[in-house]
Amino acid sequence: MAAALDAPPHAVLRLAAAEDLPGILAIERVSFATPWTEKMFAEELKNEWSNVWVTEVGEPRRIVAFTVFWVAYDEIHVLNVAVAPEERRRGHGRLILRSIVAFGEHRRMSHVVLEVRPSNEGAQRLYQSLDFRPVGVRPRYYQDNGEDAILMVRMLKR
Ligand SMILES: CC(C)(COP(=O)(O)OP(=O)(O)OC[C@H]1O[C@@H](n2cnc3c(N)ncnc32)[C@H](O)[C@@H]1OP(=O)(O)O)[C@@H](O)C(=O)NCCC(=O)NCCS
C-alpha cells in the first residue's frame, strides 16, 4: 500500500505489525474515553478476518493514524479509526477511509459499515463527505455514557 488518493504529503499507509502497538496505543489513549487495550489490538493483529493499518509520516517515520476493520464475506466493518491530535485536519482520516473503500471495491465487496457517536460531528462529516449514509441507530451502544450509535453505510461499486 502506498500513499495515494489525495494523501497528505509523504504519508504512507501500510499493514501494521506487533512492533507498531506502542504507536497505535499512544493515539488510541488520547482519542477515546474507553480506549482499547494492548491485548485487544494484539488480538486484531492475529485475527485472519481483521485488518490493522497504520499511517506514517516523517523521517524517522512515526505513526500518526491507524484503523482496524473486519472483512466478513462481502462486508467491511470499520471498528476503529483515529488520528494523532496534532495531525488532525490534514487528510489522514480521509486517506484511511478512501483506502478502505478502494480495498473493498478492488475485491468486489458490497459495502462498508461503521458506527459513530451522534456527538462526534467531525467524524460524521468526514464519513458523509465520502458518501457514507446513516441507515439506523444502535440504541445505548457506547458503554461509557450509554450514547446511541449512528450506523453508517457506504455502498461500493462492483
Ligand atoms: C475523526 C478523525 C478520525 C478525523 O481524522 P482527520 O485526519 O482529522 O480528518 P481529515 O483531515 O481527513 O478530514 C477530512 C474532512 O472531514 C471533516 N472533518 C474531519 N474532522 C472534523 C472536525 N473535527 N470538525 C468538522 N469537520 C471535520 C472535514 O470536512 C474535513 O475536511 P477539511 O479539513 O478539508 O474541512 C479524527 O478527528 C480523530 O481521530 N478523532 C478521534 C477519534 C475518533 O473520533 N474516531 C472516529 C470514531 S467513529
Image (cartoon, helix red, strand yellow):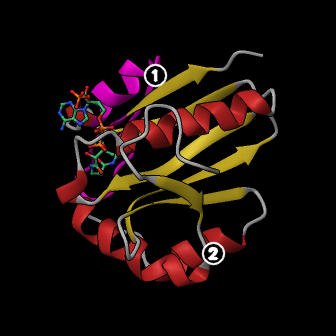
Q: Is residue 132 above or below residue 2?
A: above
Q: Amino acid at mark 1?
A: Gly
Q: Relative to 24, is 32 on the left or the right?
A: left
Q: Is residue 2 above or below residue 23?
A: above
Q: Residue at x 72, y 46 (%)?
A: 71
Q: What number is the disc on residue 43? A: 2
SS for dot 1: strand
Q: Quadrant of residue 16?
A: bottom right
Q: Residue at x 36, y 38 (%)?
A: 116
The quadrant of the picture showing ligand 1 is: top left
Mark 2 Cα-neighbour bin, 10 Å: few <14, some 14–19, many ≥20: few
In x, y percent, where is residue 127? 39, 28
Q: Is residue 16 above or below residue 18?
A: above
- Asked whether 88 or 25 is in front, the reply is 88
Q: Residue at x 57, y 38 (%)?
A: 99
Residue bounds of the magenta highlight? 123-149
Label 1 lies in ligand 1 vicinity (Cβ under 8 Å): no
Which residue matches tag 1? Answer: 136
Q: Relative to 57, is 39 on the left or the right?
A: right
In x, y percent, where is residue 66? 45, 58
- Asked whether 28 or 87 is in front, the reply is 87
Q: Relative to 55, is 99 on the left or the right?
A: right
Residue 32 can be seen, yes or no: no
In x, y percent, where is residue 7? 43, 39
For residue 11: magenta?
no
Mark 1 Cα-neighbour bin, 10 Å: few <14, some 14–19, many ≥20: few
**In which quadrant is the C terminus drawn?**
top right
Q: Quadrant of residue 76?
A: top right
For residue 127: magenta?
yes
Q: Amino acid at mark 2?
A: Glu
In x, y percent, where is residue 92? 37, 45
Residue 15 can be seen, yes or no: yes
